[in-house]
Amino acid sequence: PAALSLAIEKAKATDADLVMASDPDADRVGISCKNDKGEWVLINGNQTCMMFLYYILTQYKALGKLKGNEFCVKTIVTTELIKSIAAKNNIEMLDCYTGFKWIAREIRLREGKQKYIGGGEESYGFLAEDFVRDKDAVSACCLIAEIAAWAKDNGKTLFQLLQDIYVEYGFSKEKSISVVEKGKSGAEEIKQMMDAFRNNPPKEIAGSKVIIWKDYQTLKQADKDGKTISLDMPETSNVLQYFTEDGTKISIRPSGTEPKIKFYIEVKGEMGCRNCYNSANTDADEKVKAVAKSLGI
C-alpha cells in the first residue's frame, strides 16, 4: 500500500481511473482503482489474476480464437475461482508449485501441442501468451490498462468488472497468515507444526467437513471416502492442502527463507448483485476468522 500512496494522490488530483506500479525488477505489478464510493482501493493478486484471465478468455471467445487446445496455469495457492472461469470456457487449468519457473515448465512441456494463453500467481505475478516465459510487469501493465479501457468502453469501472465476475462465478476471499517462530527452537517448532497437520489432518474446519487432503511431500491425495490417488507434480514439496464441503481451501507450507509457517486461506460465498459486494465481503471476513480460529492460528 505504501508503495502506491504517492501515485494514488496523483491519481486523485488528475481524476485518473487506474494506478499501476511494479517492483524494482519489474516482474510483479500492483494496481489500485476507485470503488463505487469513489474511494481508491487496492486490488490483490488473486483479483488481478481473475480479471486477467476473464478478459483474455472473453476476447479469445469473441474473436473466435478458441480452438480447443488452450490451457492456463495457476500456482496451487492461487484462488480456485479462476478454475471456474476456465471451466466455463472449456479451457484446461493446470496447477503448479509457487514460482514462475513452474508455469514456464508447463508451457515448454506443451509447446507445439497446446496453446498457453494466460496464468499467474496470488503474489502479483502474471503472464499472458508465451513470449516472455516469466512473470513480467511490463506486459502485465499493458494488458491491465487494456482491461480498464475495455471496461470503460462498456460503461464499467475496473471495480465493477471485478464485481460482475463475482456475481457470475461466486464470491471468494483469500488471506495469508504467517506464524513466526524465531530463535534457536523456531525451526523445530515449525517442523512440529507441519508434522502435526500431516499426521493428524483435520476432519472438519470451521464446521465444514474436509473432503480432500493433499500432501505434496508424499504426492498423495485422499478423499473423504478413503480413495487415494497420486498427485501429478514434477517433484515433492513440503506443502499440505485441505478442501472442505463449503469450498474452503487451506494451504500450509513453511517458508524456505524465514522462520515462519504460512497459511493460505480461501473461502467461498455468494454474491447476487454488484450492490451485494460489501455484505459478501463482510461475510467472507467472518468466515476467514472462523477458519483461522479452527486451525489454531
Image: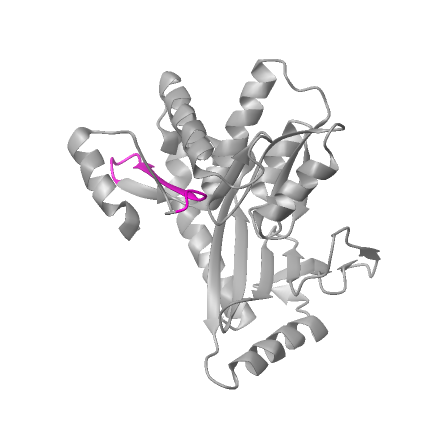
> Which residue, as the protein is rendered here, is positioned at the far left?
13
The x, y position of residue 118, in whole percent, is 58, 33
Is residue 221 in the magenta section?
no
The x, y position of residue 187, in whole percent, is 55, 79
Q: Residue at x 51, y 46 (%)?
A: 172
Is residue 35 in the magenta section?
yes
Total marks shown come to 0
Residue 35 is drawn in which quadrant? top left
Q: Residue at x 47, y 63 (%)?
A: 177
Q: Is residue 87 left or right of residue 188?
A: right
**Vertical placement of residue 108 versus 209, above or below:** above
Q: Is residue 113 left or right of residue 3?
A: right
- Magenta range is 25-39
Q: Residue at x 42, y 34 (%)?
A: 138
Residue 273 in view of the camera: no
Residue 107 in view of the camera: yes
28 or 46: which is nearer to us?
A: 28
Q: Looking at the magenta stretch, what is its main secondary structure?
A: loop
Q: Residue at x 37, y 24 (%)?
A: 156
Question: What is the basis of the colouring in this image?
Answer: one colour
**Vertical placement of residue 199 versus 28, above or below:** below
> Which residue, as the protein is rendered here, is positioned at the far top?
63
The x, y position of residue 287, in whole percent, is 49, 57
166 or 261: which is nearer to us?
A: 261
Q: Is residue 185 left or right of residue 208?
A: left
The x, y position of residue 195, in whole percent, is 66, 76
Residue 31 is drawn in which quadrant? top left
Q: Is residue 34 left or right of residue 68?
A: left
